[in-house]
């Protein structure tokens, strides 16, 4: 099969087309013939040498894909050959075929193309597990997500709004802010021209927000702490601005805050299966109805994976980037 490999740690140019054997499904695994594969920040981190695959995972990048089940391993009961699925992958999505655990796949929602379906799993698994499971967002609470025009951001805005929260976000241009507000954000703050801390204080009458989802880190960490309400929660999922900051822990103590974080890829199969089941029951009906949808940026053919990585690292994208096969 054709695949994209990482020839060495480096920039997008280190991605190269190669030939690999078609993987075979192990116990409780399915083999998917891939039609489209999502491109995500962790792929770029892996390419740069900063995010090693978990033990036993493919060394090929790619954490989500959509396609047709073409083979099943022993013990598979959920899927049969010919089923059309989108799936969370442990790796290997930049290829014509990939395997994954049967419980990490979901049916393609009604009305969505395979390209759109390929843009679902990495972001929806991440947002559901961090915002709703770990962050415990409830209807009526206030929620701030940074990077609102990213794949994670556009997903978080829609889901939080759908489940009854007041949603605020930050984005890097007026165009991106308009998009975020069209998706359900009550206010989108242009972080290049506005101080998000001051805006959050104004929008919440000085109370702050109940939950923040942050992928920036760095200088945002102490600012996030100040922007949280009493008993607020901060969930970290990435550190585009760096993992270190000077922090006044007295503010955490006095406001009774929770600071936590999570990564999705290293989690156990059962944990990912639990997230998938929650999505199947609580989120997929909203995708079926069209109430929420993946926001698409650009597609690239598999052999142009380097261009896709350059696009995501430019931060000029709005929504999801997908490779097509």
Image (cartoon, rainbow, N blue to C red):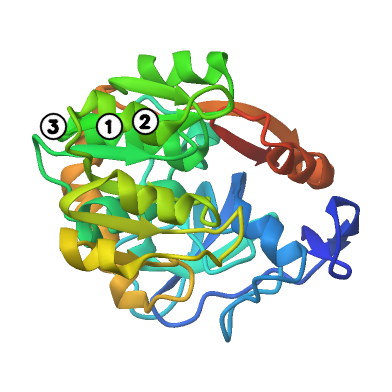
Instruction: State the image coordinates of residue 134 (x, y, percent, origin top left).
Output: 24, 62
C-alpha distance separating marks 2 and 1 = 5 Å
Please name the residue that numbered disc 2 is placed on. Answer: 198
Instruction: State the image coordinates of residue 53 (x, y, percent, origin top left).
Output: 62, 76
Residue located farthest toward the bottom when viewing the structure as drawn:
55
- At a point 74% along the width and 34% down the height, the residue shown is 300
Q: Nearer the viewer, residue 220 or 238?
A: 220
Please name the residue that numbered disc 3 is placed on. Answer: 164
Asked if disc 2 and disc 1 are in contact, CB closer than 8 Å, the reply is yes
Q: Nearer the viewer, mark 3 or mark 1?
A: 1
- At a point 30% along the width and 73% down the height, the residue shown is 271
Please name the residue that numbered disc 1 is placed on. Answer: 201
Q: Nearer the viewer, residue 44 or 253?
A: 253
- At a point 13% along the width and 39% down the height, the residue shown is 141
Disc 3 crowd rating (10 Å Cα; few below 14, some 14-19, many 20+) is some
With 323 as the anchor, is 237 left or right in this view? Answer: left
Q: Nearer the viewer, residue 187 or 92?
A: 187
Asked if disc 2 and disc 3 are in contact, CB closer than 8 Å, the reply is no
Position of the C terminus by quadrant: top right
Residue 291 lies in quadrant:
top left
With 147 as the anchor, is 192 left or right in this view? Answer: right
Position of the N terminus by quadrant: bottom right
With 103 as the anchor, is 21 left or right in this view? Answer: right
Q: Secondary structure at mark 3?
A: loop
Q: Secondary structure at mark 1?
A: helix
Q: Where is 322 relative to 221, above or below? A: above
- At a point 33% along the width and 54% down the height, the residue shown is 225
């Amino acid at each position: 099969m054709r695949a994209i490999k990482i020839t060495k740690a480096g920039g997008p140019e280190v991605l190269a087309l190669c030939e690999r054997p078609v993987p075979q499904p192990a116990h409780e695994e399915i083999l998917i013939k891939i039609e489209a594969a999502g491109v995500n920040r962790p792929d770029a981190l892996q390419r740069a040498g900063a995010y090693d695959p978990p033990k036993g995972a493919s060394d090929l990048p790619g954490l989500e894909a959509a396609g047709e089940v073409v083979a099943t391993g022993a013990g598979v009961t959920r899927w049969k050959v010919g089923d059309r699925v989108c799936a969370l992958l442990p790796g290997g999505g930049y290829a014509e075929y990939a395997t994954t655990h049967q419980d990490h796949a979901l049916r393609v929602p009604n009305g969505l193309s395979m390209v759109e379906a390929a843009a679902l799993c990495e972001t929806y698994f991440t947002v559901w597990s961090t915002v709703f499971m770990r962050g415990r967002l409830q209807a009526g609470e206030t929620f701030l997500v940074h990077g609102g025009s990213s794949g994670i951001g556009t997903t978080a805005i829609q889901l939080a709004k759908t489940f009854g929260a007041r949603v605020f976000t930050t984005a890097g241009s007026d165009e991106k802010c308009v998009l975020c507000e069209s998706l359900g954000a009550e206010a989108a703050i242009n972080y290049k021209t506005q101080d998000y801390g001051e805006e959050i204080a104004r929008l919440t009458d000085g109370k702050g927000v109940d939950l923040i989802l942050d992928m920036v880190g760095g200088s945002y960490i102490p600012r996030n702490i100040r922007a949280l309400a009493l008993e607020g929660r901060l969930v970290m999922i990435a550190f585009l601005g760096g993992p270190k900051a000077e922090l006044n822990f007295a503010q955490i103590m006095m406001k009774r805050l929770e600071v936590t974080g999570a990564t999705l890829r290293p989690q156990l199969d059962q944990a990912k299966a639990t997230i998938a089941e929650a999505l199947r029951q609580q989120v997929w009906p909203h995708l079926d109805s069209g109430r929420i949808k993946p926001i698409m940026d650009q597609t690239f053919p598999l052999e142009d994976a380097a261009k896709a990585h350059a696009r995501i690292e430019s931060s000029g994208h709005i929504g999801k980037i997908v490779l097509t096969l």
